[in-house]
């Protein structure tokens, strides 16, 4: 919204619905046929970007002042990202048609959006390249985050029920079962998770998301 005059800001506010979202709640799912754009007025959300194969490729955190969902507003295609609330959040929601109308009416909004999307694309390219060479531990961490997010449990104290076996995880991420078992054991020792048969408790989301190799 930088360099936007008051008239344009007022127009955005008038079209915006305000939502209160509790932590852990799913806001949108990959593949959803929805087109709203969301603005994060307070709190943080976690986004899972999914590859065309269906496997996750990276997680990202969006903080207060950020936005998401704009791609579906622009092209009308299905959602390419899964978003859940990392904390209690307040969101401003614009319907897809309203978002496009505002971009047409106020060119500075469109210029700001294009500039920001270019910056984000460059950053994502760097992260995707890095993911190609990620080790087994990183792939296990990301798989656990995906499972937790799907059950709206990607929060401290969240519990993944019906958790897959180490062998199932290894098949999904393309690793051997022994390597996965070593990673799970390490995460338990470090206090990041607590696992037992069929149940995994997330003790520290931020530590689980620390996937730097």
Image (cartoon, rainbow, N blue to C red):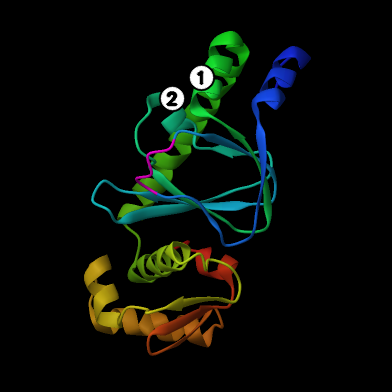
Q: Which residues are magenta?
A: 30-34
Which residue matches tag 1?
100
Residue 155 is left or right of residue 135, and the answer is right
Percent x, y of residue 210: 52, 64
Which residue matches tag 2?
74
Judging from the image, what secondary structure is the residue with disc 1 in? Answer: helix
Percent x, y of residue 125: 39, 40
Viewer-proximal residue among 156 and 182 = 156
Image marks 1 and 2: residues in contact by CB distance under 8 Å: yes
Assess disc 2: are there few (<14), some (14-19) or many (≥20) residues with their C-alpha within 10 Å of its C-alpha: some
Percent x, y of residue 184: 40, 82
| Upstream in sequence: badge 1 or badge 2 | 2
In the rendered image, the vertical position of residue 138 relative to residue 191, given as above or below: above
Specify whether residue 8 is in view: yes
Judging from the image, what secondary structure is the residue with disc 2 in? Answer: helix
In the rendered image, the vertical position of residue 166 relative to residue 33, given as above or below: below
Most prominent secondary structure in the magenta stretch? loop
Specify whether residue 210 is in view: no
Viewer-proximal residue among 45 and 92 = 92
Residue 129 painted magenta: no
The residue sitting at the right extreme is: 6
Viewer-proximal residue among 72 and 54 = 72
Q: Residue at x 69, y 18 (%)?
A: 11
Q: Which mark is residue 115?
A: none
Q: Residue at x 54, y 11 (%)?
A: 104
Q: Residue at x 49, y 31 (%)?
A: 70
Q: Residue at x 58, y 78 (%)?
A: 203
Quarter of the image where the N terminus is located? top right
In the rendered image, the vertical position of residue 136 relative to residue 13, given as above or below: below
């Amino acid at each position: 919204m930088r360099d936007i005059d008051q008239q344009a800001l007022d127009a955005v506010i008038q079209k915006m619905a305000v939502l209160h979202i509790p932590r852990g709640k799913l806001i949108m799912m990959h593949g959803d046929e929805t087109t709203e754009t969301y603005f994060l007025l307070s709190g943080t959300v976690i986004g899972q970007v999914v590859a065309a194969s269906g496997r996750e490729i990276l997680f990202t955190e969006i903080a207060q002042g950020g936005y998401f969902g704009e791609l579906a507003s622009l092209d009308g295609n299905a959602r390419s990202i899964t978003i859940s609330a990392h904390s209690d959040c307040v969101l401003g929601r614009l319907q897809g048609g309203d978002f496009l109308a505002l971009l047409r009416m106020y060119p500075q909004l469109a210029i700001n959006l294009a500039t920001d999307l270019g910056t984000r694309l460059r950053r994502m390219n760097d992260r995707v390249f890095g993911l190609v060479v990620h080790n087994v531990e990183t792939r296990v961490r990301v798989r656990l985050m995906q499972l937790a997010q799907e059950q709206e449990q990607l929060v401290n104290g969240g519990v993944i029920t019906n958790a897959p076996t180490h062998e199932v995880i290894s098949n999904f991420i393309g690793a051997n079962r022994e390597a996965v078992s070593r990673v799970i054991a390490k995460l338990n020792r470090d206090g990041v998770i607590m696992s037992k048969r069929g149940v995994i408790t997330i003790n520290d989301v931020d530590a689980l998301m620390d996937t730097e190799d």
